Amino acid sequence: MIDFEYHAPTSLDQVFGLLEQYGDDCRIMAGGTALVIQMKQRLSQPSHVIGLRNVENLNSIESTPEGVRIGGLCTQRQIENSILIGEDLPLLTDTFRKVATPRIRNMATIGGGLVNGDPNQDPPPALIALGASAFMTSSSGDRVVPLEDFFIDYYETDVQPGEVMTSVLVPRAPVGSGSVYLKFLPRTADDYGTVSVASVVSKKQDGTCKDVRIVLGSAGVTPIRAKDAEDALRGKPLTDENIRAAAALVKDVVDPLEDFRGSAEYKTDMSEVFARRAVEQAIAAIPVGS
Ligand SMILES: Cc1cc2nc3c(=O)[nH]c(=O)nc-3n(C[C@H](O)[C@H](O)[C@H](O)COP(=O)(O)OP(=O)(O)OC[C@H]3O[C@@H](n4cnc5c(N)ncnc54)[C@H](O)[C@@H]3O)c2cc1C
């Protein structure tokens, strides 16, 4: 790793000043679980690192009328253990609990993971399925980006120069909906998923599908929302046949990378299988009487 100077600002204004002063020659560090590896591998060689740890007001979890606002510096462990999130957004509790190991979750932050843009990460599919948005804050104010539009390419996200992800706003899932995050882990329990799927489903009184979200991870260079599959199910009876037909459409939108977790063909097949299971399990999780 090359030598660098570490800065520990205590306010966002100081962060913005440092970002402006050092420009391309500096990087923000939150938990450091991704950045330090990239620096050791010399994929990133900043002369200045701006640690966010001492910056105030970036790690609270608050209930708002629009949903739950999660500070950009909240650790994955904090989110997993939050009573508020457990009550309002159980899909996130389940998802964050499936990330790596407690050791990583104690350090890694929601903002760091999202900005990192690794398509194998667990939180993005669940957050996109819930319709979450990121607050990207700079000296000019806030820019709100739906997470569905945030991931541009492999490890490339919509972060503009001078911006810090200060919070993520997650709308509560509709009343009477069920949700699930499935992570296919054929190797070890702390691995990245071979494929993963988040789904949120709600149904009407007559049993037809009111709304559905299906978002896949590890199935391309970014998280992928399977809109055609969703459209195929919305308004239809939630029968096995309709769910299978919808899940089959997932194969047309995924484009997985071949790696030691499986060939692209295998991951494509597993995307369909896990999309079907995710929708089935989300339906099973709809509260009785809804
Ligand atoms: C051994 C290991 C196993 C893992 N397994 C999993 C897994 O199973 N599932 C999974 O989902 N993930 C896994 N991960 C990845 C982990 O979730 C990410 O490394 C982590 O989320 C990154 O967060 P961080 O706070 O450490 O980010 P950092 O490493 O501090 O930063 C990452 C990037 O984001 C930028 N950044 C950080 N915070 C902000 C901010 N607030 N605003 C703007 N830019 C910011 C940094 O400049 C850097 O480019 C694993 C990582 C390791 C090391």
Image (cartoon, rainbow, N blue to C red):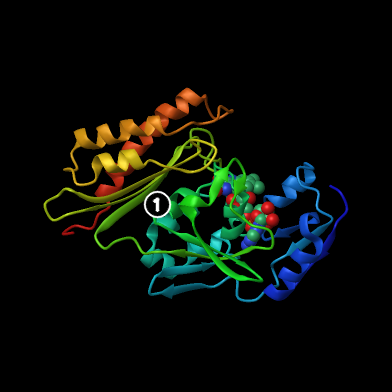
Horizontally, is 39 left or right of 93 in the view? right
Can you identify the residue that label 1 sits on? Answer: 129
Looking at the image, is 46 positioned above or below residue 231?
below
| Horizontal and vertical percent position of residue 200 | 33, 51
Residue type marked 1: Ala
Residue pictured at 49% horizontal, 43% vertical: 223
Looking at the image, is 142 positioned above or below residue 91?
below
Looking at the image, is 81 positioned above or below residue 254?
below
Residue pictured at 65% horizontal, 63% vertical: 163
| Horizontal and vertical percent position of residue 33 | 67, 52
The one nearer the camera, 122 or 86, is 122
Q: Secondary structure at mark 1?
A: helix
| Horizontal and vertical percent position of residue 199 | 35, 47
| Image quadrant occupied by the C terminus | bottom left
Specify the farthest residue to the front: 140
Looking at the image, is 13 positioned above or below residue 247?
below
Horizontally, is 152 left or right of 212 in the view? right
